[in-house]
Amino acid sequence: MSVPGATEVARAVWWLVLLRGVLAVLFGLFALFAPGTALLALVYVFGAYAILDGVAAVVAGVRHRRQEAHWVWHIVEGAISIVAGIVAFAWPGVTALVILYLVAFWSVFTGVTEAMAAFAMRRRGSPAWGWMLAAGVLGVLLGIVLVLAPGAGLLTLLWLLGIYAVVFGVIVIVWALRLRKAVARS
């Protein structure tokens, strides 16, 4: 049973799905074969986003100052975001390292919490506790490696992002072509 209008929608958008997949593959290849340029591009995209987000937060804070008691926090958040965006443009290398260290500390923190959860699971008799412990240990190790070797860590993160983007893009391309084929049959 088909949903009324679904065929028309699929016929109209299958090529957008295909375009999304192609762009993901191109980005993935770019990250794999030009990691320095890809990293710089990611930092600049983050900088642009942070500035635009900051401006939007400041505007929201100013516009809602009469309706909301916490309007000042919107302005503070916006100002911090704008400064982060300016820092990204002014010092892209520093920004890339800060992002790397955030990922490293996040990885260690989540790894430790996963290990603690694994031991709690073991006490409750869960058979999956070993997998959770392995994930926690890997998280901690990843964080340590990123802190000890930040250059290699950035390159590795870009490679992982590139591989993910290529795989994701291929999957989306296959999906788009199947969607097109299904639409052509109906």
Image (cartoon, helix red, strand yellow):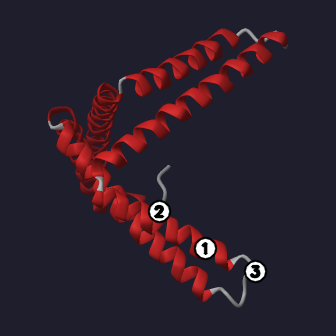
Q: Is there a contact, CB below 8 Å, between mark 3 and mark 2? A: no
Residue wearing tag 1: 74
10 Å crowding of disc 1: few (<14), some (14-19), many (20+): many
Closer to the observer: label 3 or label 2?
3
Tell me where residue 49 appears, x and y as whole percent. Answer: 38, 63
Quadrant of residue 129 within the rendered picture: top right
Residue wearing tag 3: 69
Tell me where residue 18 appears, x and y as whole percent. Answer: 25, 49
Quadrant of residue 167 within the rendered picture: top left
Residue wearing tag 2: 4
49, 152: nearer the viewer:
152
> In the figure, is residue 181 to the left or right of 70?
left
For numbered disc 2, what is the local secondary structure?
Answer: loop
Mark 3 or 1 closer to N-term? 3
For numbered disc 1, what is the local secondary structure?
Answer: helix
Residue furthest left in the image: 33
Q: Amino acid at mark 2?
A: Pro
Tell me where residue 56 appears, x and y as whole percent. Answer: 48, 76
| Point 65% across, 9% down: residue | 130
163, 96: nearer the viewer:
96
Tell me where residue 146 appears, x and y as whole percent. Answer: 41, 26
State how far apart marks 3 and 1 are (Cα).
11 Å
